[in-house]
Amino acid sequence: MKKFLIALSLLTCANFIQAQNTEKELAKNTEAAVKKLADTIPNGWTNKGNISFLFNQSNFNNWVAGGENNISGNLGINYDFNYKKDDLSWDNKILASYGLLQSDNANFEKKTDDRLEFNSILGKKAFGEWYYSLFLNFRTQFSKGYDYGTDENGAEIRTYNTNFMSPGYLTFRPGLYWKKHENLRVNFAPLTSKFTFVDSDFTSVPGYIDGDYFGVDYTKSMRYELGFYASAYYKFEIMSNVTFENILNLYSNYLEDPQNVDIDYTLNIVMKINKYLSANLQFQAIYDDNAFEGLQTREVFGVAVNYGF
């Protein structure tokens, strides 16, 4: 019996060691396959993109529970165009979306989404999976934005408060760029310049206090900041035909309140039904105390018609 237990223990240890070696070999082979795939990406330009349209309609007739007839639509574009030449890479992404809602009892059409963003990062390989990088980001909106309320008679009114390039954000920075593969990358930039552009009409109104409008001073149309920036991009498939795309940006201004870190996080979930249809969820959370002292969130969900190119 004693010999049997010893033999069984030795067999168990041998199987465990073999399993460990097999797991290590599998991990090594997987990493080698990923590296081989990256190395086989041809020099020159590559591009891919997706256009999606979300549509929603609600109609009520003698509906005792209540409801308001409305119609809405949202158009979104997600486009990548990248360049590679040996140890040099240049990755570019355009994100744009615009949506409108019209209700029967509302005096105005209202925006459900309005975003225009361009990201560009130029990298030259330094060592391993690290690159020296130069990054540029531009953000604004397409059309006028309003605050909605009611007058003394209860009628709906709106106040014009934003527009294209008001605000507009431009940041650029040198830094270090870690890129495991196309769907996993991180960028660090300790010397980042950030410009905030606004229409000076908003900063010249009577009673305006410095910094009230997106941090821009009285009669000015631009604000400059210098700080630390970090960003991360991670896209993965959680199950068949369901992808999660995560985009995170962090920024701290050395020149004023460096403890107040600006946060911009975007989550795009695509649940593919077939080649042209998918259920899409877009969620964005922003904390920027120059724009609003609190957390801003945006969510768009629906069944979308997609066209890939």
Image (spheres, rainbow, N blue to C red):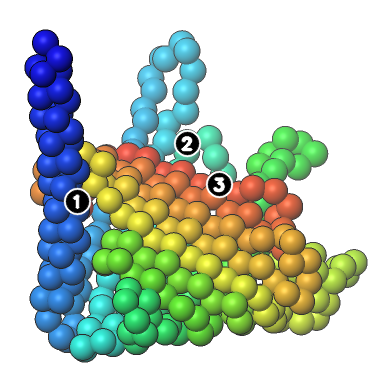
Q: Can the viewer see residue 106?
A: yes
Q: Quadrant of residue 44?
A: bottom left
Q: Amino acid at mark 1?
A: Lys
Q: Residues within 10 Å of mark 1 (few under 14, many from 20)?
A: few
Q: CA distance from mark 1 to mark 3?
A: 43 Å
Q: Can the viewer see residue 122?
A: no
Q: Earlier in the sequence, mark 2 or mark 3?
A: 2
Q: Amino acid at mark 2?
A: Asp
Q: Earlier in the sequence, mark 1 or mark 3?
A: 1
Disc 3 secondary structure class? strand
Q: Are marks 1 and 3 in contact (CB under 8 Å)?
A: no
**Which marked residue is nearer to the observer: mark 2 or mark 3?**
3
Seen at 42% across and 31% down, the residue is 69
Residue 194: percent from left, percent from top:
62, 78
Q: Which mark is residue 272?
A: none
* Residue under numbered circle 3: 297
- In the rendered image, the residue lying farthest to the right is 207
Q: CA distance from mark 2 to mark 3?
A: 26 Å
Seen at 47% across and 36% down, the residue is 104
Q: Quadrant of residue 90?
A: bottom left
208, 275: nearer the viewer: 275
* Residue under numbered circle 1: 24
* Residue under numbered circle 2: 104
